[in-house]
Image (cartoon, rainbow, N blue to C red):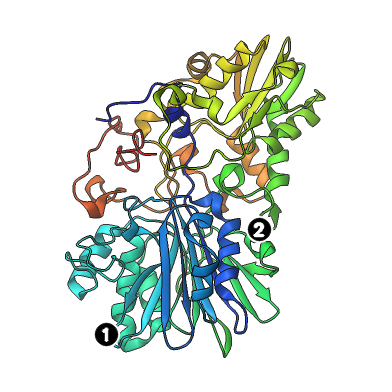
Amino acid sequence: MVTDLPYPGSAEAVEQDTPREECGVFGVWAPGEEVAKLAFYGLFALQHRGQEAAGISVGDGSQMLVYKDLGLVSQVFDEQVLASLRGHVAVGHARYSTTGGSTWENAQPTFRTTVTGRGLALGHNGNLVNTAELFDRAVAEGADTASGNASSAAGSCQRATSDSDLVCGLLAVNAADKGVEQAAMELLPTVRGAFSMVFSDESTLYAARDAHGVRPLVLGRLERGWVVASETAALDIVGASFVREVEPGELLAIDSEGLRSQRFANPEPKGCVFEYVYLARPDTTIAGRSVHSTRVEIGRRLAREHPAEADLVMPVPESGTPAAIGYAQEADIAYGNGLVKNAYVGRTFIEPSQTIRQLGIRLKLNPLREVIRGKRLVVVDDSVVRGNTQRALVKMLREAGALEVHVRIASPPVRWPCFYGIDFASRAELIANGLDLDGVRQSIGADSLGYVSLDGLVAASEQPRNRLCAACFDGNYPIPIPEEDRIGKHLLEGPATSGGDAATSSDPVLPSGYGAEDAVSRP
C-alpha cells in the first residue's frame, strides 16, 4: 500500500499530478561536424521528455567516450566537456525513468564493450514488457553480472537496472561474433514493448523502432551527415531537414557507405495518442500532422462536445494553451491569459522549506486577479491524473475572484496506467478510475467538468483509430502485458511493493503498483 501521501494542495502533490514524460533520444553521424554540440542542442530541444539525467557518447572510428550524469542537459554539459567529446558519431539521451531507479548507473547512453574490445552505446525511449525474460537471457549469455557492468561508475558495486542496459548488454555479447548490425537484426525481434532506440559503435550510427511504432522517431539530413531524433523539433534546432519517420519494425544503419534499411518485424502501427495531448512539443510534427494544429482542433471539438456559458476562456499554461485557443474560437468566447507561469520552475536541487511547499501550485502559476475577478471562466487543461493540480487551481481562481470555474480537459479520462513509456500513477491513484464524471467535478471543486471524447481526440489527430494506442484511456493494450511479478519499474532492483485496486474479472490482468511504488514520494 502506498503511504505518506502529500497534502493534496502541496507542491509535492501538484508536481506528481502530471504524466511523467518518458525519454528523448538523439543520434548524429556527421564527419567534420562537432557532433557532441549537435547532440547537446538536440537534447536541449528534447529536454521536456526527460529531466532526470542526460548523456552523450561520441565515437571517432577507433574509440568511444561517454559522458553522462544526473540533472538537466544544461547542468550536465558545459563547453569544456563538449570540447573533449570529439568524433563523427554521437548518441544522446535525456532520461525520465520508467524502468530502473533514478541513479547514475541508469543514466544513458548505457555503455558496454564486446569481448573484442569494441564499444557500444545505446539510448532508449519507451518501455519493454519482457524485461524479466531478457534478464534471464542476459544472465545465461553472460551479458549481466551482479557485481557490476560497464554502465556502472568505476569502483561501484552498483549495476544498471534498466531494460535499456539489458538490450545493450545482449547486443554487445552477440556483436562480438556477428557484428552490431546482424546482432541487432537477431535480437530486436525478441524485444517486446515500446522502443525507439539510437545506438552506435565507434563508427556507425543505428536507429530502431518497435513494430508498433509506439514512440516517435524521425530521420533528418544534414549537409554533411544524418540525424535521428525523438521529435522533428530536435531536427529543426540543429538545422537538419526532415526526411521521414523511422518506420515501425525498421533498423537503420548509417556509416561511410551511406544509409541502409532493414526490416526486423512486420509493421503494426500503434502510435501513442498521448504524444498529441501532452508529451510532444507543439512545434513537432507526428505522422504528417502538426501537434499544435491537433491541439487546437481538440479544443474546437471540446467546445462542441462540452459548451459553457462563460466570459473568458483561459489555458493552464503551457500544455493547455493550443486547446484553449481552439475552444475560444469555436465557442466565440474571449480568450485570455489568467495565469502567469514561472518559466524557471523546473527541477531544482534546493529543497524548499515546509512554508514554501505549502504554497503548492503558486510555485508554478500565479493568477492575474484583474483578468479573473468577476468572470465566469472556462479553464482548459491537457489531462487529469490525480486531480491535485485542478483542485488547487480551482481553489486559487475562486480566491482570485472568479464567479464560476468550468474545467475542460483536452483528453479523455485517464483510467489505466501506461506500460509503454509514460510513468502515470497506479490505477488506484487515478482519480477517473474511482469516480464518475460528477464525482471528479465535486472532488476538484469545479462548477462543471468536461473531457473531450476519445473519438474527438482521434479525429483531431487525423490518424486512423486502428493506428493509435489509447490504452491509458480505454484499457486496450496492443502489446500483451505479462504477469504482475514479471513487470514493474523496479523489477531489476528486487521485490517492489505493490498497491492499488484488485482487477475485476473483466479487467486486463495488470500489476496495480507498476510505475507508482514511489510515485507519491519521489521528486
Going by the numbered disc 1, the residue's amino acid type is Val
- Which mark is drawn over residue 115? 1
Q: Nearer the viewer, residue 488 or 341?
A: 341
Q: Is residue 59 left or right of residue 341?
A: left
Q: Residue at x 44, y 34 (%)?
A: 16
Residue 401 in the image, given as x and y percentages of width and height = 67, 10
- Which mark is drawn over residue 212? none
10 Å crowding of disc 2: few (<14), some (14-19), many (20+): many
- Quarter assignment of residue 364: top right
Q: How many marks?
A: 2
Q: Mark 2 to mark 1: distance in Å?
A: 38 Å
Residue behind mark 2: 233
Residue 207 in the image, given as x and y percentages of width and height = 50, 72
10 Å crowding of disc 1: few (<14), some (14-19), many (20+): few
SS type, badge 2: helix
- Quarter assignment of residue 408: top right
Q: Nearer the viewer, residue 385 or 117?
A: 117
Q: Residue at x 53, y 17 (%)?
A: 441
Going by the numbered disc 2, the residue's amino acid type is Ala
Q: Residue at x 30, y 37 (%)?
A: 512
Q: Is residue 65 left or right of residue 317?
A: left
Point out the image quarter for the N terminus.
Answer: top left
Point out the image quarter for the C terminus.
Answer: top left
Q: Is residue 378 above or below residue 410?
A: above
Tell me if I can see residue 153 in this picture.
Answer: yes
SS type, badge 1: loop
Residue 199 in the image, given as x and y percentages of width and height = 45, 73
Q: Is residue 41 above or below residue 471?
A: below
Q: Is residue 507 left or right of residue 454?
A: left
